[in-house]
Image: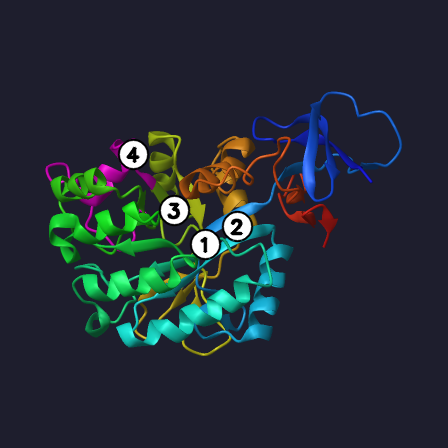
Amino acid sequence: MTTVLAARGVCPPGPPAPGWVAIDDGVVVEVGIGAARPGPGVVDLGDALLAPGFLDLQVNGIGDVEFATAGTDDWARAEHALVQAGTTGYCPTFVSAPLDSYEPTLARARVAREHTDAILGVHLEGPFLGNAPGAHPRELLCPVDLGWLEHTLSTHADVITLVTLAPEADPGCAAIKLLSDGGVVVALGHSTASYEEARAAVDAGATVVTHLFNGMGPLHHRKPGLAGAALTDERLTPTLIADLVHVHPVALQLAIGAKRSVALVTDAVAIGDGRFTQRDGAARLPDGTLAGSTLTLDRAIANVAALGLPVERAIEMATTIPAEVLGLRDRGRLAPGTRADLVALDPASLAVQAVWLAGERT
Protein backbone atom coordinates (compact mmCIF):
# COMPACT_ATOMS: atom_id res chain seq x y z
CA MET A 1 0.00 0.00 0.00
CA THR A 2 1.32 3.41 -0.97
CA THR A 3 1.55 6.13 1.68
CA VAL A 4 1.83 9.77 0.68
CA LEU A 5 3.32 12.39 2.99
CA ALA A 6 2.45 15.97 2.05
CA ALA A 7 4.01 19.07 3.59
CA ARG A 8 4.39 22.78 2.89
CA GLY A 9 8.15 22.46 2.96
CA VAL A 10 9.73 19.47 1.18
CA CYS A 11 13.56 19.52 0.97
CA PRO A 12 14.55 16.71 -1.38
CA PRO A 13 17.26 18.51 -1.15
CA GLY A 14 16.68 22.07 -2.25
CA PRO A 15 14.79 25.08 -0.87
CA PRO A 16 11.63 24.08 1.01
CA ALA A 17 8.59 24.01 -1.26
CA PRO A 18 5.09 22.57 -1.01
CA GLY A 19 5.09 18.99 -2.14
CA TRP A 20 4.68 15.33 -1.31
CA VAL A 21 6.58 12.06 -1.07
CA ALA A 22 5.02 8.70 -1.99
CA ILE A 23 6.31 5.61 -0.18
CA ASP A 24 5.76 1.95 -0.97
CA ASP A 25 7.39 -1.07 0.67
CA GLY A 26 9.93 1.06 2.51
CA VAL A 27 11.12 2.92 -0.58
CA VAL A 28 10.39 6.35 -2.00
CA VAL A 29 8.54 5.81 -5.29
CA GLU A 30 7.61 9.36 -6.22
CA VAL A 31 8.41 12.93 -5.17
CA GLY A 32 6.32 15.87 -6.27
CA ILE A 33 6.64 19.59 -5.80
CA GLY A 34 3.44 21.58 -5.92
CA ALA A 35 -0.12 20.71 -4.99
CA ALA A 36 -0.71 17.59 -2.93
CA ARG A 37 -0.81 14.34 -4.87
CA PRO A 38 -4.42 13.39 -5.55
CA GLY A 39 -5.90 10.20 -4.26
CA PRO A 40 -6.48 8.42 -0.94
CA GLY A 41 -3.90 7.80 1.76
CA VAL A 42 -2.42 11.28 1.91
CA VAL A 43 -0.99 12.23 5.33
CA ASP A 44 -1.01 16.02 5.58
CA LEU A 45 1.92 17.21 7.73
CA GLY A 46 0.85 20.84 7.51
CA ASP A 47 3.63 23.40 7.54
CA ALA A 48 6.34 20.90 8.51
CA LEU A 49 9.67 20.66 6.73
CA LEU A 50 10.05 17.16 5.27
CA ALA A 51 13.68 16.09 4.81
CA PRO A 52 15.74 12.94 4.37
CA GLY A 53 16.81 11.20 7.57
CA PHE A 54 20.05 12.56 9.03
CA LEU A 55 23.35 10.68 8.70
CA ASP A 56 26.04 11.01 11.39
CA LEU A 57 29.57 10.02 10.38
CA GLN A 58 30.93 10.30 13.91
CA VAL A 59 29.03 9.40 17.05
CA ASN A 60 30.72 7.67 19.99
CA GLY A 61 27.62 7.23 22.11
CA ILE A 62 24.52 8.84 23.51
CA GLY A 63 22.94 8.97 26.96
CA ASP A 64 24.72 6.35 29.06
CA VAL A 65 25.68 4.14 26.09
CA GLU A 66 29.18 4.20 24.64
CA PHE A 67 29.23 2.12 21.46
CA ALA A 68 32.70 0.74 22.09
CA THR A 69 31.46 -1.13 25.17
CA ALA A 70 27.77 -1.49 24.34
CA GLY A 71 25.89 -4.75 24.76
CA THR A 72 22.99 -5.86 22.57
CA ASP A 73 20.30 -4.04 24.53
CA ASP A 74 22.49 -0.94 24.79
CA TRP A 75 22.76 -0.65 21.01
CA ALA A 76 18.99 -0.74 20.67
CA ARG A 77 18.48 1.93 23.33
CA ALA A 78 21.11 4.21 21.82
CA GLU A 79 19.70 3.82 18.32
CA HIS A 80 16.22 4.66 19.56
CA ALA A 81 17.55 7.90 21.05
CA LEU A 82 19.35 8.79 17.83
CA VAL A 83 16.29 8.10 15.70
CA GLN A 84 14.10 10.26 17.92
CA ALA A 85 16.47 13.13 17.09
CA GLY A 86 16.18 12.43 13.36
CA THR A 87 19.35 10.38 12.82
CA THR A 88 18.39 7.39 10.69
CA GLY A 89 21.92 6.32 9.75
CA TYR A 90 25.15 6.52 11.73
CA CYS A 91 28.75 5.40 12.02
CA PRO A 92 29.41 4.21 15.58
CA THR A 93 32.84 5.59 16.38
CA PHE A 94 35.55 3.84 18.38
CA VAL A 95 38.37 6.03 19.68
CA SER A 96 41.99 5.07 20.33
CA ALA A 97 42.46 1.86 22.29
CA PRO A 98 45.09 -0.90 22.60
CA LEU A 99 45.34 -2.76 19.30
CA ASP A 100 44.43 -6.09 20.89
CA SER A 101 41.15 -4.68 22.22
CA TYR A 102 39.51 -3.96 18.84
CA GLU A 103 38.65 -7.55 17.90
CA PRO A 104 35.83 -8.07 20.45
CA THR A 105 34.60 -4.50 19.94
CA LEU A 106 34.28 -4.96 16.19
CA ALA A 107 32.68 -8.37 16.69
CA ARG A 108 29.97 -6.77 18.86
CA ALA A 109 29.43 -4.10 16.21
CA ARG A 110 28.95 -6.80 13.58
CA VAL A 111 26.25 -8.46 15.69
CA ALA A 112 24.54 -5.11 16.27
CA ARG A 113 24.59 -4.35 12.55
CA GLU A 114 22.80 -7.60 11.80
CA HIS A 115 19.75 -6.25 13.62
CA THR A 116 19.44 -2.83 11.99
CA ASP A 117 19.92 -0.96 8.73
CA ALA A 118 20.78 2.25 10.56
CA ILE A 119 24.42 1.32 11.23
CA LEU A 120 26.40 2.51 8.22
CA GLY A 121 29.64 0.92 9.37
CA VAL A 122 32.17 1.56 12.10
CA HIS A 123 34.37 4.66 12.22
CA LEU A 124 37.79 3.95 13.75
CA GLU A 125 39.14 7.25 15.09
CA GLY A 126 42.66 6.20 16.01
CA PRO A 127 44.92 4.90 17.34
CA PHE A 128 47.11 5.95 14.38
CA LEU A 129 46.98 9.63 15.31
CA GLY A 130 49.54 12.41 15.53
CA ASN A 131 50.57 15.44 17.51
CA ALA A 132 47.10 16.84 18.29
CA PRO A 133 45.57 14.04 20.37
CA GLY A 134 42.84 16.06 22.07
CA ALA A 135 41.07 13.70 24.46
CA HIS A 136 42.84 10.60 23.07
CA PRO A 137 45.37 9.31 25.65
CA ARG A 138 48.83 9.88 24.22
CA GLU A 139 50.06 6.54 25.49
CA LEU A 140 47.59 4.75 23.21
CA LEU A 141 48.65 6.53 20.02
CA CYS A 142 51.07 4.80 17.70
CA PRO A 143 52.42 4.79 14.16
CA VAL A 144 50.50 2.72 11.65
CA ASP A 145 50.88 -1.03 12.14
CA LEU A 146 50.30 -2.31 8.62
CA GLY A 147 50.24 -5.94 9.70
CA TRP A 148 47.51 -5.28 12.24
CA LEU A 149 45.58 -3.17 9.77
CA GLU A 150 45.74 -5.79 7.03
CA HIS A 151 44.57 -8.51 9.42
CA THR A 152 41.76 -6.36 10.82
CA LEU A 153 40.53 -5.44 7.36
CA SER A 154 40.62 -9.05 6.21
CA THR A 155 38.49 -10.01 9.22
CA HIS A 156 36.19 -7.00 9.43
CA ALA A 157 36.09 -5.46 5.96
CA ASP A 158 32.29 -5.61 6.07
CA VAL A 159 32.18 -3.67 9.35
CA ILE A 160 34.77 -0.89 9.01
CA THR A 161 33.58 1.98 6.83
CA LEU A 162 35.67 4.97 7.90
CA VAL A 163 39.11 5.38 9.48
CA THR A 164 40.62 8.59 10.85
CA LEU A 165 44.41 8.72 10.97
CA ALA A 166 47.15 11.35 10.97
CA PRO A 167 49.54 11.72 8.02
CA GLU A 168 52.52 11.85 10.40
CA ALA A 169 51.55 8.41 11.73
CA ASP A 170 51.52 7.00 8.19
CA PRO A 171 54.83 7.94 6.52
CA GLY A 172 54.68 7.16 2.83
CA CYS A 173 50.86 6.94 3.08
CA ALA A 174 50.94 3.14 2.92
CA ALA A 175 47.94 2.78 5.26
CA ILE A 176 45.93 5.37 3.37
CA LYS A 177 46.53 3.49 0.12
CA LEU A 178 45.68 0.15 1.75
CA LEU A 179 42.44 1.46 3.20
CA SER A 180 41.25 3.39 0.17
CA ASP A 181 42.09 0.50 -2.17
CA GLY A 182 39.99 -1.69 0.15
CA GLY A 183 36.97 0.61 -0.12
CA VAL A 184 37.37 2.21 3.31
CA VAL A 185 36.90 5.98 3.51
CA VAL A 186 40.02 7.63 4.93
CA ALA A 187 39.80 10.76 7.05
CA LEU A 188 42.67 12.92 8.29
CA GLY A 189 42.57 14.18 11.84
CA HIS A 190 44.26 14.71 15.20
CA SER A 191 47.24 15.92 13.27
CA THR A 192 49.73 18.75 12.96
CA ALA A 193 50.57 17.78 9.38
CA SER A 194 51.74 20.48 7.04
CA TYR A 195 49.67 21.57 4.08
CA GLU A 196 52.02 19.64 1.80
CA GLU A 197 51.75 16.49 3.91
CA ALA A 198 47.96 16.77 3.89
CA ARG A 199 47.90 17.13 0.12
CA ALA A 200 50.14 14.07 -0.23
CA ALA A 201 47.66 12.11 1.90
CA VAL A 202 44.84 13.25 -0.38
CA ASP A 203 46.83 12.14 -3.42
CA ALA A 204 47.08 8.72 -1.74
CA GLY A 205 43.30 8.47 -1.27
CA ALA A 206 42.15 10.43 1.80
CA THR A 207 38.83 12.21 1.22
CA VAL A 208 37.66 13.53 4.63
CA VAL A 209 39.00 15.79 7.40
CA THR A 210 37.68 14.85 10.84
CA HIS A 211 36.12 17.67 12.92
CA LEU A 212 37.76 20.62 11.19
CA PHE A 213 39.66 23.00 13.51
CA ASN A 214 39.51 20.54 16.41
CA GLY A 215 42.45 18.20 16.93
CA MET A 216 44.75 19.85 14.39
CA GLY A 217 47.27 22.62 13.98
CA PRO A 218 45.92 26.15 13.53
CA LEU A 219 45.29 27.81 10.18
CA HIS A 220 48.33 30.09 9.88
CA HIS A 221 48.76 32.54 7.04
CA ARG A 222 52.19 31.11 6.12
CA LYS A 223 51.56 27.54 7.28
CA PRO A 224 47.98 26.65 6.34
CA GLY A 225 48.36 23.04 7.48
CA LEU A 226 45.58 20.46 7.47
CA ALA A 227 42.89 23.10 8.01
CA GLY A 228 44.05 24.99 4.94
CA ALA A 229 43.96 21.83 2.85
CA ALA A 230 40.48 20.99 4.15
CA LEU A 231 39.12 24.36 3.08
CA THR A 232 40.73 24.58 -0.36
CA ASP A 233 41.18 21.06 -1.74
CA GLU A 234 37.93 20.09 -3.43
CA ARG A 235 38.77 16.41 -2.95
CA LEU A 236 38.35 16.79 0.81
CA THR A 237 35.12 16.97 2.79
CA PRO A 238 35.70 18.52 6.21
CA THR A 239 33.30 17.67 9.02
CA LEU A 240 32.22 20.17 11.66
CA ILE A 241 30.92 19.87 15.22
CA ALA A 242 28.34 22.67 15.21
CA ASP A 243 27.56 22.84 18.93
CA LEU A 244 28.92 26.43 19.08
CA VAL A 245 31.48 25.23 21.65
CA HIS A 246 33.96 23.22 19.59
CA VAL A 247 34.02 25.82 16.81
CA HIS A 248 33.26 29.54 17.03
CA PRO A 249 30.26 30.66 14.94
CA VAL A 250 32.52 32.84 12.77
CA ALA A 251 34.77 29.86 11.98
CA LEU A 252 31.69 27.79 11.16
CA GLN A 253 30.52 30.44 8.72
CA LEU A 254 33.95 30.67 7.09
CA ALA A 255 34.20 26.91 6.64
CA ILE A 256 30.67 26.45 5.32
CA GLY A 257 31.15 29.36 2.95
CA ALA A 258 34.43 28.00 1.61
CA LYS A 259 32.99 25.00 -0.23
CA ARG A 260 29.84 22.97 -0.72
CA SER A 261 31.23 19.69 0.57
CA VAL A 262 31.11 20.19 4.33
CA ALA A 263 29.36 17.69 6.61
CA LEU A 264 27.92 18.04 10.09
CA VAL A 265 28.81 15.45 12.73
CA THR A 266 28.03 15.27 16.42
CA ASP A 267 31.11 13.50 17.85
CA ALA A 268 28.69 12.84 20.69
CA VAL A 269 29.80 10.81 23.70
CA ALA A 270 27.99 9.04 26.51
CA ILE A 271 27.69 11.27 29.54
CA GLY A 272 25.83 8.92 31.85
CA ASP A 273 28.70 6.44 32.25
CA GLY A 274 30.71 8.83 34.45
CA ARG A 275 33.86 9.19 32.35
CA PHE A 276 33.07 12.72 31.23
CA THR A 277 31.44 15.77 32.71
CA GLN A 278 29.05 18.03 30.87
CA ARG A 279 30.06 21.66 31.13
CA ASP A 280 29.30 24.73 29.02
CA GLY A 281 27.38 22.65 26.50
CA ALA A 282 30.07 20.04 25.81
CA ALA A 283 31.64 16.90 27.25
CA ARG A 284 34.97 17.32 29.01
CA LEU A 285 37.63 15.31 30.76
CA PRO A 286 38.24 16.09 34.45
CA ASP A 287 41.05 18.49 33.43
CA GLY A 288 38.68 20.47 31.20
CA THR A 289 39.84 19.04 27.86
CA LEU A 290 37.07 18.88 25.27
CA ALA A 291 36.17 15.22 24.85
CA GLY A 292 33.30 15.27 22.41
CA SER A 293 29.86 16.81 22.34
CA THR A 294 26.41 16.27 23.76
CA LEU A 295 24.97 17.29 20.39
CA THR A 296 22.34 15.68 18.19
CA LEU A 297 22.14 16.40 14.48
CA ASP A 298 18.79 18.16 14.70
CA ARG A 299 20.36 20.69 17.06
CA ALA A 300 23.41 21.02 14.83
CA ILE A 301 21.15 21.85 11.90
CA ALA A 302 19.28 24.43 13.99
CA ASN A 303 22.57 25.99 15.12
CA VAL A 304 23.82 26.32 11.55
CA ALA A 305 20.52 27.77 10.34
CA ALA A 306 20.60 30.29 13.20
CA LEU A 307 23.83 31.68 11.73
CA GLY A 308 21.75 32.97 8.83
CA LEU A 309 22.40 30.12 6.42
CA PRO A 310 19.50 28.75 4.36
CA VAL A 311 17.79 25.85 6.08
CA GLU A 312 18.26 23.66 3.02
CA ARG A 313 22.02 24.20 3.29
CA ALA A 314 22.02 23.10 6.92
CA ILE A 315 19.93 20.03 6.09
CA GLU A 316 22.15 19.12 3.13
CA MET A 317 25.19 19.04 5.42
CA ALA A 318 23.55 16.36 7.57
CA THR A 319 22.00 14.32 4.76
CA THR A 320 23.18 14.54 1.16
CA ILE A 321 26.83 15.33 1.83
CA PRO A 322 27.44 12.53 4.40
CA ALA A 323 25.79 10.12 1.96
CA GLU A 324 28.16 11.28 -0.77
CA VAL A 325 31.15 10.81 1.56
CA LEU A 326 30.20 7.15 2.05
CA GLY A 327 29.12 6.60 -1.54
CA LEU A 328 25.53 5.85 -0.53
CA ARG A 329 23.04 6.38 -3.32
CA ASP A 330 19.98 5.17 -1.44
CA ARG A 331 20.15 7.70 1.42
CA GLY A 332 20.62 11.38 2.02
CA ARG A 333 17.97 12.56 -0.44
CA LEU A 334 14.32 12.12 -1.31
CA ALA A 335 14.14 10.59 -4.77
CA PRO A 336 12.57 7.54 -6.36
CA GLY A 337 14.45 4.42 -5.29
CA THR A 338 15.90 5.81 -2.07
CA ARG A 339 15.12 4.41 1.37
CA ALA A 340 12.03 5.96 2.91
CA ASP A 341 13.92 7.38 5.92
CA LEU A 342 12.37 10.79 6.51
CA VAL A 343 12.23 13.47 9.17
CA ALA A 344 9.51 16.08 9.68
CA LEU A 345 10.79 19.27 11.33
CA ASP A 346 9.05 22.21 12.92
CA PRO A 347 9.64 25.05 10.41
CA ALA A 348 10.43 27.60 13.14
CA SER A 349 12.52 25.71 15.69
CA LEU A 350 13.68 22.84 13.41
CA ALA A 351 12.81 20.46 16.24
CA VAL A 352 11.95 16.93 15.14
CA GLN A 353 8.21 16.31 14.91
CA ALA A 354 8.19 12.82 13.39
CA VAL A 355 10.54 10.21 11.92
CA TRP A 356 9.96 7.41 9.41
CA LEU A 357 12.32 4.45 9.07
CA ALA A 358 11.86 2.51 5.83
CA GLY A 359 8.42 4.11 5.54
CA GLU A 360 7.28 3.22 9.06
CA ARG A 361 6.63 6.02 11.50
CA THR A 362 8.65 5.47 14.67
Which region is colored magenta? 212-237
> Reading the chain from its start, which is encountered first: label 2 or label 3?
3
Q: Is residue 57 above or below residue 236?
A: below
Secondary structure category for the residue under label 3: strand
Q: Which residue is mark 1?
A: 266
Q: Which residue is mark 4?
A: 235
Q: Nearer the viewer, residue 170 or 312?
A: 170
- Crowd tier of the residue under label 4, counting other residues whose Cα lies within 10 Å: few below 14, some 14–19, many 20 or above: some
Rounded to the nearest angstrom, the CA distance separating label 2 from label 3 is 11 Å
Rounded to the nearest angstrom, the CA distance separating label 4 from label 1 is 22 Å
Asked whether residue 162 is in view, the answer is yes
Q: Which residue is mark 2?
A: 297
Q: Is residue 227 above or below residue 122?
A: above
Residue type highlighted by circle 1: Thr
> Reading the chain from its start, which is encountered first: label 4 or label 1?
4
> Reading the chain from its start, which is encountered first: label 4 or label 2?
4
Rounded to the nearest angstrom, the CA distance separating label 1 from label 2 is 6 Å
- Discs 1, 2 touching: Cβ within 8 Å: yes
Q: Which residue is mark 3?
A: 240
> Reading the chain from its start, which is encountered first: label 1 or label 2?
1
- Discs 2, 3 touching: Cβ within 8 Å: no
